[in-house]
Amino acid sequence: MSTATSIISSGSDKLDAWTRRAQPKIQINIAGQKPGHVNSYTTAESIEGSITVTVEHETRFDEIEIAFEGVSRTTVERASCPGRTGSQQMFLKLRQPIDEMEYPTPRVLESGRSYEYPFTFVVPDRLLPQVCSHARKNVHIQRSHTMLPPTLGDPILASNGKTLLDDMAPSMSQICYTVRATVLQKQLTGHGVVAVAAVAKKVRIIPTVEEEPPIEISGSPSLCTRKEKSVKRGTLRGKLGRIVASSSQPKPIQLLPPDGEPTDTVSTVATVNLRFDPVGDEQPPPLGTMTSKLRANTFFSAAPWEDFPSTTGMPFAHIGCGLYTENVPLMTMCVASAQWTKQSSAADSMRRDSTDSSSSDSSTGPSSAFSGDTYYTASVIVPVTLPKSKAFVPTFHSCLMSRVYALDLCLTYHTPAANLMTPTISLRLPVQFTSQAKCAESVKTTLGVTVTQQELEEFFHPRNVTSPTDFSSHIRSDVVDVSLAPPEYSERLSALRASR
């Protein structure tokens, strides 16, 4: 059988696709977007715009779909054999309903005409529960997995709209948000539909993230909030005593919402408490410098995470999982001026026995070998300022990937004798990155209405949810589908349009 005969026998719809000279042209216009820039949005903001469809020749169609989609993709090196495996999950799909009266009758796109359809999507604060339907070992994991994750892993989008920045994510993990427009046509044979033309435009999403409870550090060997070391007189010489450094998780680093103007250069501060327990009447060692750097850990997996990921044993202990770490130097500051204060255990005991509540002891606890009465304490305040050369995203956990941060602090001190290497003592503290919400006033100005913050939150909360549909057609055959049903919010925001 010849090629032409086989094409004709397969149906006139395939013949039409084969002989079609040009597909419909779709243009997506997002309000406020400048040439060469990518629009950024946060929670409760509306993504508005319109699509324009034109054709060179009359084209039959059945439906035009406008959707706002969120997709995460991961690829992981196989542990058992060479090659890669991966997963793709469509965790969000909002559809813009189009009234039947807005379509031409009959359903034919005519040459020389432009067909325009507006759309409005509101960035939700949470995903639907069925996004996280996999097995879970932690009761809190579903709550974290149904929080809206930020855009991640696309250097084009990891920007402030003015400068391309690196968000420190590997090429093996990506979270992407797009506005997609598709012209659909029913097949003449069968019940399916085919996409005659489809176009997508990326947007950047940085959701509002609030502060979470402090991280449990006792069960994490990769973190260290207290360390003690022996202070030696020199190589192969006796000890002066022991130095102890301790700190706690600093306050979260609050990222500005998209297009927010910075108001302060210092993001947060960490306080390092020091203690020196001398062997006899030795003086504490002079301090040198404090060096700080930020560790950005990106976890990714080919299968959904059943618990919060940890750097312990990664990546070889977890088959099908990966960890990418990037260190960001922050600052090196001289702390030689920090003053040691002489303390007495007997005086501490008297203060504790006193009824004066203001004399509470907040110093670092004694070292493991301390048995004397006199010791010394000092404190070092370490400001944490984020460099502008990197794009930071809030801390998040999703089904396929996570981003967590840690603050590394390294203190040098000096001993009486010369050393080949300057002695140091280091800590590693967990630090959360949150994202501020846009104030109600700015959103009210955009909407042109007068509402309270509570009314605003209730208005943007998804209300009507349609039954999810299978999206297997969007998944490549070489990846593992981790969600059989992407959530769809199909409520038309008529109130938003009416307010204008």
Image (cartoon, helix red, strand yellow):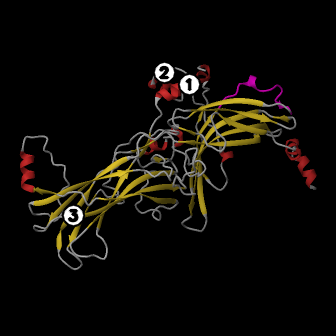
Q: Is residue 482 magenta?
A: no
Q: In terms of secondary structure, where does tag 1 sit?
A: helix
Do the residues bearing badges 2 and 1 touch, measured as CB atoms within 8 Å? yes
- Give the crowd class for mark 1: few <14, some 14-19, many >=20 residues within 10 Å: some
Q: In terms of secondary structure, where does tag 3 sit?
A: strand
Q: Amino acid under label 2?
A: Val
- Quick one: label 3 or label 1, which is nearer the N terminus? 3
The residue lying at 78 percent from left, 33 percent from top is: 62
Quarter of the figure with residue 40: top right
- Quick one: label 3 or label 2, which is nearer the N terminus? 3
Whether residue 249 is visible here, answered yes or no, is no
- Give the crowd class for mark 2: few <14, some 14-19, many >=20 residues within 10 Å: some
Quadrant (top left/top right/bottom left/bottom right) for the N terminus: bottom right
Do the residues bearing badges 3 and 1 touch, measured as CB atoms within 8 Å? no
> Magenta stretch?
96-111
Q: Which residue is mark 2?
A: 451
Closest to the observer, 10 or 241: 241
Q: CA distance from mark 2 to mark 1?
A: 10 Å
Q: In the picture provided, is 108 more to the left or to the right than 226?
A: right
Q: Is residue 242 above or below residue 68?
A: below
The residue lying at 8 percent from left, 47 percent from top is: 351
- Give the crowd class for mark 3: few <14, some 14-19, many >=20 residues within 10 Å: many
Residue 355 is situated, as x and y percent measured from the top left of the image, at 7, 40
Q: Amino acid under label 1?
A: Leu
Q: Which residue is mark 3?
A: 243
Residue 447 numbered tag: 1
